[in-house]
Amino acid sequence: MKIDYIIYNGMPDSIRLTGLLQLHKVIFGSSDDLQMKMETKPKLLVIVAQIDEEIIGYKIGYELEDDTFYSWLGGVDPKYQKHGIGTKLMEKQHQWIKENGYTYVQTKTMNKWRSMLLLNIKNGFDVIDTYIDKKGLQKIVLEKRLINE
């Protein structure tokens, strides 16, 4: 199984964007106006994992502050989970973040996304905060210092 990882500084091309949006809907159950939200993010970074032309995973982030990058959304097609694709996407994102001068990467998750919570903790993230959002859902804020790792 040969997996290609493609990095986009900004929006991906229309073919990969369509595949990403379809996969997002499979993983999260809706499109959440994702394309429109992506278009508003500063210094957007999109990384896709694909086999041939099929998008099987993705990681999206953007600049939060001058020294902090926000790892916003990501996921792997359920058919391809447990093959290290999520970890590889995270590694590629963190490498790009360091190369582009950021010191920290931050993300948020919820208890129901246990695999993402564990992946983040296993990869050096610390829980720095929790809060209840406008929908009454508890969010967990995690951060990792990328310099000197």
Image: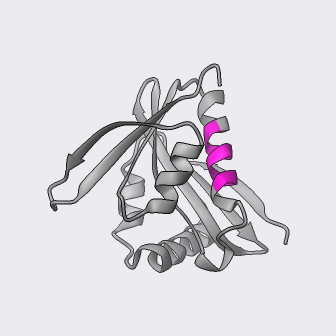
Residue in the image at 62% along x and 72% along y: 15
**Corner quadrant of residue 93:** top right
Depth check: 42 or 138 in front? 138
Is residue 62 at all visible to an observer of this figure? yes
Reply yes or no: does residue 33 show up in magenta: no
Tell me: residue 27, above or below residue 49: below
Q: Position of residue 114 (x, y in %)?
A: 45, 61
Magenta stretch: helix, strand or loop mostly: helix
Going by the picture, which residue comes out furthest to the right?
A: 2
Question: In the rendered image, is residue 10 in sight?
Answer: no
**Which segment is the magenta one?**
87-94
Q: Quadrant of the N terminus?
A: bottom right
Q: Quadrant of residue 99?
A: top right
- Percent across and percent down for residue 14 are 58, 68
Query: In this rendering, would 30 be left or right of 85?
Result: left
Question: Is 92 covered by the magenta stretch?
Answer: yes
Q: Residue at x 39, y 79 (%)?
A: 29
Q: Residue at x 52, y 47 (%)?
A: 120
Looking at the image, is 120 positioned above or below residue 51? above
Q: Is residue 76 left or right of residue 30?
A: right
